[in-house]
Amino acid sequence: MARWGMVIDLDKCTACQACVVACQAENNIPNANPESAAKGRNIHWLEMIPFIEEEYPHTRMRLLPRPCMHCENPPCIEVCPVGATQISSEGIVGQINARCIGCRYCTTACPYTVKSFNWFKPAWPKGMERYLNPDVTVRYNGVVEKCTFCHHRLQKARDKARF
């Protein structure tokens, strides 16, 4: 069985977090307001995990990108009571938002904590809605969301390859 994978060259990563911003924009992920962010209710499909080494004044920090790992045997699938989390034949762990009941069992089961619960109705500053990606559905509140491995881009590439 063929499986997709993602490689991030950490030797070239400068920790600028452009990949995080690009993921947010590409997938219509709303920014949290400061109060929600303080409660840990912001949504990230890709995060940079900080590793702080040594102590002041010789402190060094490096960041490690952490997307969904699309596990071979994902524990999040086993605990979902409605089958909202599934794995494709290509190894992509997907989330069917219309089926999700928001129980968050999958967020607890995920060993990498890469699933986010959508606490609030998505909103963007006035004028920003024009920049939403028309290829990606805006998820409603009360569901869990996660990295889809840019499924919409893979599908476009498949469609183009067939012609």
Image (cartoon, helix red, strand yellow):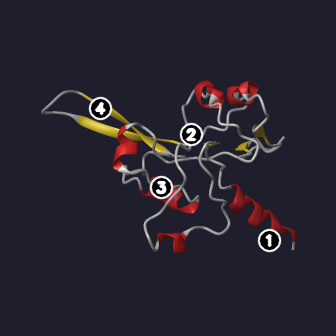
How far is mark 4 from mark 1, CA to CA?
44 Å
Q: Quadrant of the N terminus?
A: top right
The answer to which of 151 and 108 lies nearer the viewer is 108
Three-letter amino acid code at disc 3? Cys
Q: In the image shown, does 149 or 3 lie closer to the viewer?
A: 149
Instruction: Determine whether label 4 and label 2 are within 8 Å by CB.
Output: no
Name the residue beneath numbered marker 4. 52
In terms of secondary structure, where does tag 3 sit?
helix
The residue nearer to you, when weighing 150 against 2, is 150
Q: Which of marks 3 and 4 is nearer the N terminus?
A: 3
Tell me which label, 4 or 1, sits earlier in the chain. Answer: 4
Measured Cα–Cα span from mark 1 to mark 3: 25 Å
Circle 1 SS class: helix
Mark 1 or mark 3, which has the lower sequence index?
3
Q: Where is residue 144 in the image (x, y as percent from the top left)?
A: 62, 40
What element does badge 2 sit on?
strand
The amino acid at mark 4 is: Ile
In the image, is residue 29 above or below residue 66?
below
Q: Alpha carbon of mark 4 to alpha carbon of mark 2: how far? A: 28 Å
Q: Distance between the residues labelled 3 and 2?
A: 21 Å
How far across and down, in percent of the image, does residue 111 sit? 58, 26
The residue where tag 1 is placed is 160
On residue 19, the disc is 3
Residue 55 occupies which quadrant of the picture?
top left
N-term mark: 4 or 2: 4
Query: Cβ–Cβ below 8 Å for labels 1 and 2?
Result: no
- Three-letter amino acid code of the residue under disc 1: Lys
Q: Count residues near mark 1 (Cα–Cα under 10 Å), then give few for <14, some for 14-19, many for 20+.
A: few
